[in-house]
Image: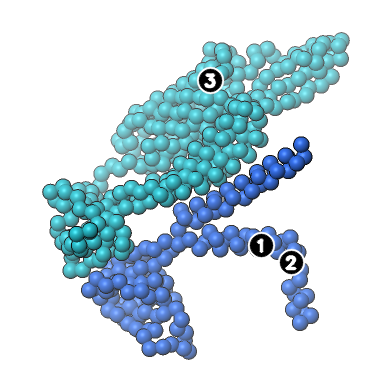
Chain colours: A cyan, B blue
Amino acid sequence: MRTLPALVALLALSAAAARAATVDDAVLRLLPGERVAVRTPANEWTTGAFVTNRNDSLYLRRPSGTIALSYGSIAGLRARQNQRREGMSVGMLAGGVSLAFLSGSNSGSTSDAIYLGMGGIIVGGFVGGLIGAATHRWKDVYDENSALAATTPLGRRPSQIGARVGYVTSTQPSNQGPSASLIALPGIVGLEISYFPLPADDAPPPTLVYFTSDVRRAGGTLELHLVTHIGPRSGPVRPGLRLGVGPTIDLIRFDRYQGDGFGNLLGVSRVSDSEFRLGLDASPGVRFGSRAWSFAVEGTYHVVGGRGEYSDFYGILLGVSRE
Amino acid sequence: MDRFRARCYPASPMRFRAAAALVSLLVVTGGCTALHRVPVRPEITSETRSLERPGGMSITGYQTRDGVFHTFNGWVSLSASPDTLLFRRHRSTEWFAEPGDTFRLARADVPSLLYRSADSGKSGVVLLGVLTAAILALVTLAAIAFAHWE
């Protein structure tokens, strides 16, 4: 779990992109030999390898020879970049979550899931980084329309972090209690870590114990969900819907009450276990406030696979978000 | 010599090996750099702030107004006049400099500078590659040991 903040920071860094305000500034950052694509005012694209710039003209090497394009004829400029960082981030996330989930599903052991998850993060990050290094995409480094728009402050699509606390319940009276979650949305997709109460046994702790098999169950549920947020990101009142999917880990505690055979309680032994499941959640809500920090009120509904009658729960969450 | 030995000996072999492994890892991952180009503006920006420092900015090249890129491994800084850039090669020192090791160019004649900086993406992949190799080696060794043990 300690790797998660670093992963989120990495995702946030990879999502950050800056465009130059002027074509001159954008051209002066191109490297000799770099593949670039130039858009003309007629919306036609010309690609080639950057040679140099002088006298307010850009020189590109093309198979047919070197051509010069004056800055006035450049409406947009793109540079080809590899996807190493993005590939590494996605690989770490995919490798870590999938191996942790698979190992947890097979062995049911939290320690196995953590070790294999760490291994999955390392190997997945390496493989993802290699794939990303071999994959290229065009990145906008200058756009005439954006440069004009930059002079008038418009709402941009910001990243979002948030924290929530709340109370959840279900049709089963025992499945209720406080909950908490942390959300990081660097772009369209982000992560949410949540903790919810685990359905406990309805029966209270026994006072008369005749057999050692008298067991009571309690614990909590940890969710690590990939989430997305649907809704406006500007304005003083912003209704929205957050959808999530991912592994749900039931951290179960069994209290085994031991008796002497005559109804007297000798002691309680505690055994911990964990079970991996797949969960879905939907959280409609409203955020208030037009500054960096806003206040959030959300309802939340969760479905957890393989839990039988305890498969769903719902609740209300309050918290803050920073965008 | 005895005093020298007495001073250097205290590091235990285990700690020395751990330090050597750490240094090797840092050398492997820290050696990954990427080439960047930064515009030279009439005003100092956050990217060219190091031009004002006494040591200057470490560069690998510069561009002149005629569009030509020049390879130059050294430092560049603002000279006494803010309109002039002072270039100094890496090999030159205060006492030894060959002709051409140090020269000045008008700031307006240098549209951009080329420099290298650490590439965290490349370093990250190399570091993860080293760790992946270590994991694969350990898993292979464990599999061999397990096969022999059975």
The reply to whether dot 1 and dot 2 touch (C-beta < 8 Å) is yes
Q: Which residue is mark 1?
A: B19
Q: Which residue is mark 2?
A: B11
Work out whether residue A94 can be spotted.
Answer: yes
**Structural crowding at the residue carrying mark 2, measured as other residues with C-alpha within 10 Å and reported as few (<14), some (14–19) or many (≥20):** few
Q: Which residue is mark 3?
A: A305
Residue B89, placed above or below residue A87: below
Viewer-side residue, B74 vs A137: A137
The chain under label 1 reads: B
Q: Which image quadrant is residue A185 in?
A: top left
Percent position (x, y) of residue A309?
A: 56, 12
Residue type beneath disc 3: Gly
Percent position (x, y) of residue A313?
A: 51, 19
Viewer-side residue, A44 vs B87: A44
User: Dot 2: what SS?
Assistant: loop
Residue type beneath disc 2: Ala
Report the quarter where the C terminus of chain A lies: top left
Residue B43, placed above or below residue B100: above
Residue B91, placed above or below residue A76: below
User: Dot 1: what SS?
Assistant: helix
